[in-house]
């Protein structure tokens, strides 16, 4: 006679008391779906694996934050989505840092030319680079002014480049709701961009 599977609610209550066996059961139940969700967002298996571990560390340390409203899986995927978005923002910031050539203390000729392959001719014009940076900051400010549920959809669709069905699954809403929020976002950002 096989035992009845334990509910997510029960497992979470046990995890709150630091029951490692309950955590292992929950991990086995959801690890693959969380990894798959993260892989669709970050598109790198090693990063998805690292972020999956981070998500489950958060479940272990913050299990009491789940309020029981809605399915546990939706709460778990929201943690995964936020973890991936934070990662993607960090990667984007690192990419925007200028690349500097290390100076070789043994090299007397410090005026060696920069190799052509390291120069981005498209962004060589400082005025253009300044203007693009200002536009990015302006757009970021407009996005930050969006209501939270719209801002979340914006980041998933445009930053993480997720499909609408994946965004809907992650947020626990119908795809039509995601499309509606995207329509709202586009109209509002276009209007505010024109006003600025």
Image (spheres, rainbow, N blue to C red):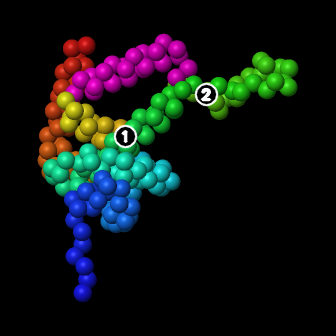
Q: Closest to the observer: 116 or 149? A: 149
Q: Is residue 95 visible?
A: yes
Image quadrant of residue 138?
Answer: top left
Does the magenta-highlighted stretch encompass residue 140?
yes
Residue 163 is labelled as: none
Horizontal and vertical percent for residue 121?
A: 57, 25
**Residue 163 vertical position relative to residue 131 in the rendered view, above or below:** below
Tell me if mark 1 has few (under 14), some (14-19) or many (20+) residues whose alpha carbon lies within 10 angstroms of its own: many
- Residue 66 shown left or right of residue 30 in the figure: left
Horizontal and vertical percent for residue 126?
A: 52, 14
Main SS of residues in magenta: helix
Question: Callout 1: helix, strand or loop?
Answer: helix
Horizontal and vertical percent for residue 144?
A: 28, 25
Q: Closest to the observer: 78 or 65? A: 65
**Residue 51 vertical position relative to residue 114 in the rendered view, above or below:** below
Residue stretch in magenta? 123-146
Residue 85 is labelled as: 1
Q: Which residue is mark 2?
A: 99
Query: Could you tell me which residue is drawn at 41 percent across and 34 percent down?
Result: 89
Question: Callout 2: helix, strand or loop?
Answer: loop
Horizontal and vertical percent for residue 103?
A: 75, 24
Image quadrant of residue 3?
Answer: bottom left
Q: Is residue 163 visible?
A: no
Check the image and name the residue furthest to the bottom. Answer: 1
**Residue 188 vertical position relative to residue 21 in the rendered view, above or below:** above
Tell me if mark 2 has few (under 14), some (14-19) or many (20+) residues whose alpha carbon lies within 10 angstroms of its own: few
Query: Could you tell me which residue is drawn at 37 percent across and 40 percent down?
Result: 85
- Residue 36 shown left or right of residue 67 in the figure: right
Q: Closest to the observer: 40 or 148? A: 148
Q: Closest to the observer: 78 or 67? A: 67
Query: How far apart are the two marked residues, 2 and 1, measured between alpha carbons?
Result: 24 Å
């Amino acid at each position: 006679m096989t035992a009845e599977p334990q509910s997510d609610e029960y497992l979470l209550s046990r995890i709150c008391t630091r029951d490692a066996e309950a955590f292992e059961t929950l991990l086995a139940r959801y690890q693959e779906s969380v990894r798959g969700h993260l892989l669709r967002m970050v598109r790198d298996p090693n990063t998805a694996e690292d972020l999956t571990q981070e998500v489950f560390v958060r479940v272990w340390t913050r299990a009491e934050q789940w309020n029981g409203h809605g399915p546990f899986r939706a709460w778990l995927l929201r943690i995964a989505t936020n973890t991936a978005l934070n990662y993607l923002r960090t990667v984007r910031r690192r990419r925007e840092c200028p690349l500097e050539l290390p100076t070789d203390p043994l090299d007397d000729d410090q005026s060696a030319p920069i190799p052509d392959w390291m120069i981005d001719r498209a962004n060589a014009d400082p005025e253009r680079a300044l203007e693009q940076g200002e536009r990015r900051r302006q757009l970021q400010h407009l996005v930050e002014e969006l209501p939270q549920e719209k801002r979340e959809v914006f980041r998933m669709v445009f930053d993480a480049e997720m499909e609408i069905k994946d965004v809907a699954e992650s947020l626990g809403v119908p795809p039509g709701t995601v499309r509606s929020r995207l329509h709202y976002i586009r109209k509002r950002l276009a209007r505010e961009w024109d006003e600025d």
